Image: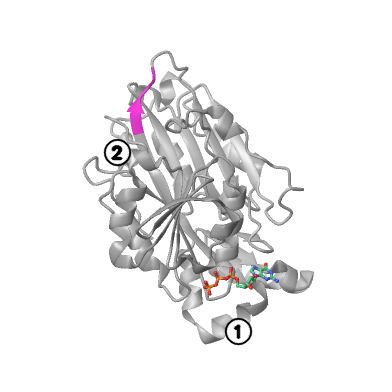
């Protein structure tokens, strides 16, 4: 199977004035080497001046720091995704800022249904104004529905409420948000790592290659991002993983476990391929690709969440290892995994749409 470099598409939603643009500007500023493609409804609020505008063609703006912005409405979405996912755009992630009034599930559906093979859904991020939460819910009862389908909720404007009120809002949001991770922030100050992988880019600007240094090198220096506390767990195994047990683990992954990424070795169940695992919120995909020649057969995963129990996650993953010949997976156990492999011709959504 030929592998196609897939680009996560993250949808950023939230009510008018909740702080979406502020968060986006923060992400653009702190993305460092990662090339971010941005789609917004209008350029007005993006601090284009803060960056060097390298060139502008039609409604696409190419920014000096490697970002690409375009102004879209829904009918143009596919066209712009097509442009932004071209290898020549060399983007690592695309963020779509939904307008404050947009129904985010429509956008999520469009991304999941995209026939563009280079597109992979990167999650729905909902921004909530901590100081206006009750009032917003009252005026917009659909808030509850939006939170229920989010993969990550940012309780923004933490600076505008006291610690007790922040805790109360956080808890109320977490109750509504189901399995989404919930993080508090001021001025959108979330670690970009929560939304996308930092690119391990070679100096020649060549295509991005995810390395294990990249996976392991998750910053945890909270001084940098006081409001973005999260936990990461790295897991490595040199025994193959049991497909059914790993799927059981993934199907019941705990609340707050926002992202899982890495490679899985299923051993004799598919000796030819390693499986790239990409989970964001409730979204889960496996992408098989032939083992690179000479590559050590290891499973390596990084799990990122907020309020998760690292020891318990480690233990649960340890329990997914194949312990010996008598523990060999039964016939057909890979079928469960293959349900989460996109169809080669569509790249669309196989098992789980939100
Ligand atoms: N005090 C405080 N103000 C914030 C914070 N985040 C954003 N703001 C301010 O809130 C206002 C709205 O922020 P935006 O980022 O424009 O919000 P938005 O969700 O993009 O708004 P729309 O584009 O209208 O939907 C701006 O004046 C921001 O400076 C925060 O954490 N604390």
The residue to which callout 2 is attached is 335
Callout 1 crowding tier (Cα within 10 Å): few <14, some 14–19, many ≥20:
few
Residue 230 position, x and y percent, is 66, 49
- Visible in this render: residue 11? yes
Residue 110: which disc?
none
Q: Residue 136 at what x, y percent from top left?
A: 57, 81
x%, y% of residue 224?
73, 48
Residue that lies at the very extreme toward the bottom in this rendered image: 139
Determine the secondary structure under disc 1: helix
In the image shown, does 178 or 287 lie closer to the viewer?
287
Quarter holding the C terminus is bottom left
Q: Quadrant of ligand 1?
A: bottom right
Q: Nearer the viewer, mark 1 or mark 2?
A: 1
User: Is-magenta flag for residue 290?
Assistant: yes
**In the foreground, 309 or 227:** 227
- Whether 223 is drawn above or below 245: the answer is below
In the rendered image, which quarter is residue 272 located in?
top left
Please say if 89 is above or below 201. Answer: below
- Contact between labelled residues 2 and 1, with CB atoms less than 8 Å apart: no
Q: Nearer the viewer, residue 343 or 131?
A: 131
Residue at the far left: name it.
345
Q: Which residues are magenta?
A: 288-292
Mark 2 Cα shell of 10 Å, populated few (<14), some (14-19), many (≥20): few
């Amino acid at each position: 199977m030929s592998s196609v470099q897939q680009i996560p598409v993250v949808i950023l939603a939230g009510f008018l004035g909740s702080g979406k643009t502020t968060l986006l500007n923060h992400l653009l500023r702190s993305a460092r080497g990662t090339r971010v493609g941005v789609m917004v409804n209008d350029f007005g609020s993006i601090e284009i001046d803060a960056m060097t505008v390298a060139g502008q063609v039609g409604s696409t703006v190419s920014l000096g720091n490697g970002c690409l912005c375009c102004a879209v409405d829904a009918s143009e979405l596919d066209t712009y995704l097509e442009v932004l996912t071209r290898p020549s755009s060399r983007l690592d992630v695309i963020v779509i800022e939904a307008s404050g009034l947009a129904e985010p599930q429509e956008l999520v559906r469009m991304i999941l249904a995209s026939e563009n093979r280079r597109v992979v859904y990167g999650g729905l991020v909902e921004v909530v104004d901590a100081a206006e939460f009750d009032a917003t819910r009252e005026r917009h009862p659909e808030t509850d529905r939006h939170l229920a389908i989010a993969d990550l909720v940012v309780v923004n404007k933490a600076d505008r409420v006291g610690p007790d009120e922040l805790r109360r809002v956080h808890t109320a949001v977490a109750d509504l948000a189901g399995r989404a991770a919930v993080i508090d922030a001021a001025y959108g100050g979330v670690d970009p790592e929560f939304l996308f992988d930092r690119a391990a880019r070679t100096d020649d600007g060549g295509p991005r290659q995810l390395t294990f240094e990249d996976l392991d090198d998750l910053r945890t220096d909270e001084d940098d991002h006081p409001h973005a506390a999260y936990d990461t767990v790295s897991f490595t195994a040199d025994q193959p993983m049991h497909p059914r047990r790993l799927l059981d683990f993934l199907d019941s992954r705990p609340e707050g476990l926002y992202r899982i990424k890495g490679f899985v070795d299923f051993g004799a169940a598919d000796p030819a391929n390693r499986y790239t695992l990409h989970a964001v919120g409730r979204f889960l995909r496996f992408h098989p690709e032939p083992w690179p020649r000479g590559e050590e057969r290891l499973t390596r995963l990084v799990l990122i969440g907020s309020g998760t129990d690292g020891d318990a996650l480690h233990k649960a993953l340890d329990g997914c290892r194949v312990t010996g010949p008598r523990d060999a997976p039964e016939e057909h156990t890979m079928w469960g995994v293959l349900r989460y492999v996109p169809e080669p011709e569509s790249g669309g959504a196989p098992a789980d749409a939100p």
